[in-house]
Image: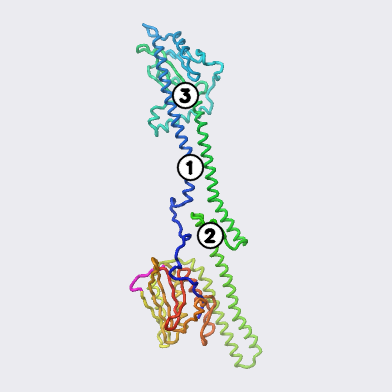
Amino acid sequence: MSDGGRQGKKAGDKNAPSRKNQRRGPTLLGSRIARLIFASNLAGLAILIVGAMVLNEMRAGFVVSKKQDLIAQAQVFSGLLSDDATTPEPALNPEAARLAIARLNLPERIRARIYTPTGEMVADSYFLSDMVDVAALPPLREPGWIARTGRDLSEWAGEVFGVFSPRRSSEALRTQTFEEEFRAAALGEQAASQRFSDRGQRVISVSMPIQRVSAVVGVLVVEGSDIDEIIRAERVALVPFVGVAVLMAFVTSILLTIGIARPMRRLAIAADRIRAGSSARMDIPQLTRRTDEIGDLATSLQAMTEALIERIEANEQFAADVAHELKNPLTSIRSAVETLERVQDPDAAARLRAVIASDVKRLDRLITDISNASRLEAEMTRLPSETIDIARFVRDVVHTYEGLSDSAEAVHVAFTDATLGARLLVRGREGPLGQVLRNLIDNARSFSSPGSKVEVTLEQTNYGPRTVARILVEDSGPGIPEDKLETIFNRFYTDRPKGTAFGNNSGLGLSIVKQIVETHRGEVWASNKPGGGARFTVDLPAI
């Protein structure tokens, strides 16, 4: 018989999925690397956000507290100054106002000024208090671009965050000019704001009307200019958060480099070594043992590389086998031609010509089968797979042999559907699967005696949760030697009874059958029937 054998596998466990072959789905949350990337990159940002929220809340609370403190002081001061106002015509007493300011002993960063309702300054604590060194005060200057930018950002932040924090928005200070604040106080209203002073300092200002009975006799302006120091202190307090965030980003970058970038680089180096020919295998056990996507990728690349190497080796072996098989008939033809030139006997010359014709026929058969085998692999990758009703498909293939069974001496081919009406579906390609059935049936017919029958049977077999469509092709020939049950599937193997026409078989038929079945994730093997004859079994996974 012809061509190639089983691989020693059992039908029940050939497709059992291993842990490394169980691929994870494309869901984002199901990815360990995705979770690592998200967690590591958000960690530093979360630290900064939390720190900024804490410090902003502290700053807002401080500003509100500072405003309330200044309002309380301004109310006390305005009450004292209103008592010193002259009667019966309400008017501000300048001397009493300056004396009161001098007695207040205000802190260095608190400044109090008294104005008449018309805007004339009467007293300034910076010049009347002993605690303030006027010579040490910064010179008058316009706010720089940094101060103006900070002021603009503060105004914008107040508007934006006021939307999200209405409580703070209602308590926060508006940014307005001194003239706007003074006009509100001159009309008898309490006014508070934050702005830059004429020395470029950010100040919190409270303007309180000084009233005698209901008449406004003056305006008391109390300013706190220590807010810049507080902001700088808060910025200094933010440095540890920034440092931790930077450190976290640095650590996570190292982890991502070690966990992702370096393994990917190792895969690339291993692939380059194989491409350059310095290595025959992709040996990356540390990566293939990983349980994440990197491990899956390494396993897939290693399996793909091994499959490519096996295919290259198989092609090399196939080329060597082809050369050997072609050399035999060519050698025979050359020997016959050389002998024919010296032979004078017509009968011997006729025999030599018959040998040459037989060898040419064998060469033609070999070249045809080799071409088909070479084309098979490309066709298996190009042709799309489809769902096939295997009972209908096998019946149609067997039906093509009915026209060859008219004479009594012909070998009949019969089909039996033993699935008890079950509809078995397989995933595959009709062309290659049809070639499997035709090769097996032709092989069985070639070993069957005239008038005998080749039986084709379809069965349904279950291996646990897995359903298999089993196709049996049985003949009534001499059977297969027990030591050849696997060898018959090898390329170019031929073992036929005496009297068989030479050159009709290339030894590739069963090899092609095995290749097609394994491509369809199936299995094929040969055995002998108890009553005599050979049996070929093809198992295909059903869907």
Give the main secondary structure, helix, strand or loop, of the magenta stretch: loop
Do we see residue 293 in this rendering? yes
In the rendered image, residue 494, in percent from the top left (x then y), is placed at 53, 80
In the rendered image, residue 139, in percent from the top left (x then y), is placed at 55, 19
> Separation of disc 1 and disc 3 at Cα?
36 Å
Number of numbered discs on residues: 3
As drawn, is 454 to the left or to the right of 287?
left
Q: Where is 38 relative to 355, above or below?
A: above
Q: Which residue is mark 3?
A: 195
Q: Which residue is mark 2?
A: 301
Classed neighbour count for the residue bearing mark 2: other residues with Cα under 10 Å, few (<14), some (14–19), many (≥20):
some
**Chain part drawn in magenta:** 419-426
Q: Which of the pair 53/181 is nearer the observer?
A: 53
Q: Which residue is mark 1?
A: 43
Q: Amino acid at mark 3?
A: Arg
Q: Earlier in the sequence, mark 1 or mark 2?
A: 1
